[in-house]
Amino acid sequence: MEAKASDRAYASLREDIVEWRLQPGTVLQEVEQSERLGVSRTPVREALARLTADGLVAAQGGRGLVVTTVSVESVEQLFELRRALEQEAARAAARNREPGAFLGLRDRFHAAADLLADGDPSHARYYALVDDLDRAIDDAAANPYLVAALRNLRPHLARLRRVSRDDPARLRAAAQEHLLIVEAIVDGDAELAASATRVHLYRSLQSVLASAERLTSIKETP
């Protein structure tokens, strides 16, 4: 019972952080969060420990645990690591020549414009498609150490989606970039898959940095 409550508390708090319902700098007190989530303090404490391990929550002076901030410097560092990991994952997925799941993903990305025009401001269906691509690349890469590193990184990247979803033109361009990655994997072209990933991440980073003023918590670090 407690383990399940802990999982629910973790999932709820993680989603609230990723979706910016819990803003950077928000103090997360056990009593307050247990009342809000309808669980006891023990599962909340366990959930906060997991979020701390994820790097989404950190101890700050005498304030206790707070939601970590997002700075321009941290965004650049995240993308530096992301480039190394995702390029290698795409390269490995193409090299392993198992196009199965990617054929369906190719068709779905061809129709991505419809997902982005469905009137949902959160673009949940489009991001679910991107998540499916991530999982397919993870499976095809067949490198558990690489996959573990990527999964540790993704909660931080998910927080940046708020910038992208406010820019429909960027999302449409990103869908085409994802399509090129998928096509390269289907064709077994490892270097094109890595190159397409590098271009996608470069453009994504430029978009986030150019839109930094939309999120007041992203600011130049001293």
Image (cartoon, rainbow, N blue to C red):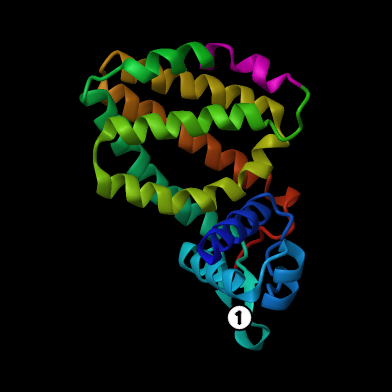
Q: Residue at left 61%, top 50%?
A: 159
- Residue 67, compared with residue 8, is above or below; it is below
Q: Position of residue 136 (x, y in %)?
A: 38, 29
Query: Quick check: can you spot residue 26?
Result: no
Q: Secondary structure at mark 1?
A: loop
Q: Position of residue 100 (x, y in %)?
A: 32, 16
Mark 1 = which residue? Answer: 60
Q: Residues within 10 Å of mark 1 (few under 14, many from 20)?
A: few
- The amino acid marked with disc number 1 is Gln
The C terminus: image quadrant: bottom right
Q: Is residue 217 left or right of residue 104?
A: right
203 or 217, which lies in front? 217
The magenta segment is 109-118
Count of labels shown?
Answer: 1
- Residue 187, compared with residue 198, is above or below; it is above
Question: Quadrant location of residue 196?
Answer: top left
Query: Quick check: can you spot residue 165?
Result: yes
Residue 116 forms part of the magenta stretch: yes
Q: Residue at left 72%, top 35%?
A: 122
Q: Is residue 114 left or right of residue 187?
A: right
The N terminus: image quadrant: bottom right
Residue 38 forms part of the magenta stretch: no
Q: Position of residue 138 (x, y in %)?
A: 34, 36
Q: Is residue 44 left or right of residue 134?
A: right
Q: Residue at left 71%, top 69%?
A: 33
